[in-house]
Image: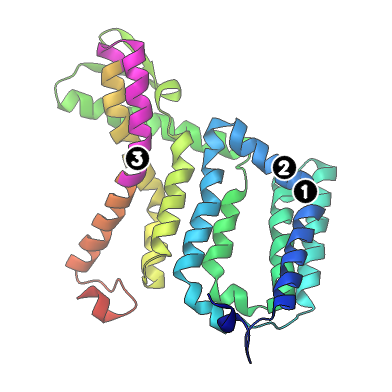
Amino acid sequence: MSSSALTGRHGWTGLQLATLALLVAGAVWSCLPAWKDIWLVATQKDDSGYILLAPIVAGYLFWIRRSRLRFVRCRTSLLGPAILVGGYALTWLGDERDIHLAEHLGAIVAVVGAVVTMTGLEVLRQFGAVFLSLLFLLPVPGSVRHEIAGPLQLSAAKFTTGFLELIGVPAIREGAVIRIKDTPVAVGEACDGMRMVFALVLVVFAFVFSVPLRPVTRITLIALSPLVALVCNVLRLVPTSLVYGFADPATAQSVHDVAGWLMLPAALLMLLGIVRLMRWLDLPVFRWRLLAT
């Protein structure tokens, strides 16, 4: 955006933009230990790599909404400092009580408070999806990951075994272990989906908020995201199980890694297919009828 667009009657001056940048930097600095912890979790834990995608999604959602900047004016609000202080207090409380989720959430809330200080609540209305995407920066607690991983492993093993038997491959399921030609394939080790499930949910979120869908359509697609993750996980596990059972470990690991990255475009194609199915059923999908014709 040109400087002439940022200045003017309802625009931003250079001093106002600098003040906003300083406030955001100050909010990050005040919760720096929490941000460092988020970075360490994202880079050192394999199943938390989705955190690194969150800023990319936030930037993408901001870019496609950049025309809304003309509605966001410099309107200082006392609610901003209150949110900022509340975020810092939440971070402090989380650190004192060893509640990492509260500590990390407080850091994000503090940044939101810094922005609201200079813009008021209008920025949240215009860029709500961008701020919501920042919640994907939160590392999922281990207890939650365990609750998700267990059912996901069992379901993926069950459906994968059924599919293998359907195509004539003898397979026996023992809990979350699939046995092919007396070779055990542990779903938890080969492909439990935890490394990709939150990335898939993030892809669903980015998709539903990058297309002018009706609110009910967005809610439906987000609600279907666990099913999309399960289907993608089974699609990944079928070839992985086959190569683990019939090929050498090095080849199996290569197939496992490649199949993992293919899950993101597969999830996007599934979402497009669901939208096309809803349109074929003549269900109201888009906000504007013109886009659905």
In-front residue for pair 264/241: 264
Q: Residues within 10 Å of mark 2 (few under 14, many from 20)?
A: few
**How far apart, in angstroms, are the residues tagged by discs 3 and 1?**
34 Å
| Residue 251 is inside the magenta segment | yes
Please give the residue where the numbered disc 3 appears in the rendered image.
263
Image coords of residue 129 (percent x, y): 52, 66
Dominant SS type (magenta): helix
Please give the residue where the numbered disc 1 appears in the rendered image.
32
Image coords of residue 152 (percent x, y): 43, 35
Going by the image, does 31 lie left or right of 54? right
The answer to whether 68 is drawn above or below residue 207 in the figure is: below
Going by the image, does 251 lie left or right of 52? left
- Image point (21%, 61%), residue name: 277
- Give the quadrant of residue 109: bottom right
Give whichever of discs 2 and 3 has the lower sequence position. Answer: 2
**Secondary structure type for disc 1:** helix
Q: Amino acid at mark 2?
A: Lys
Question: Given contact means CB atoms under 8 Å apart, are the residues at marks 2 and 3 in contact?
Answer: no
Span of residues in magenta: 244-265
Residue 238 got which mark? none
Please say whether residue 261 is visible from this viewpoint: yes
- Give the quadrant of residue 233: top left
Image coords of residue 72 (percent x, y): 60, 80
Q: Which marked residue is nearer to the observer: mark 2 or mark 3?
A: 2
- Image point (57%, 76%), residue name: 125
| Residue 210 is inside the magenta segment | no
The residue most toward the left is 168
Q: Residues within 10 Å of mark 3 (few under 14, many from 20)?
A: many
Q: Amino acid at mark 1?
A: Leu
User: What colour scheme does the image use?
Assistant: rainbow
Please give the residue where the numbered disc 2 appears in the rendered image.
36
In-front residue for pair 140/65: 65
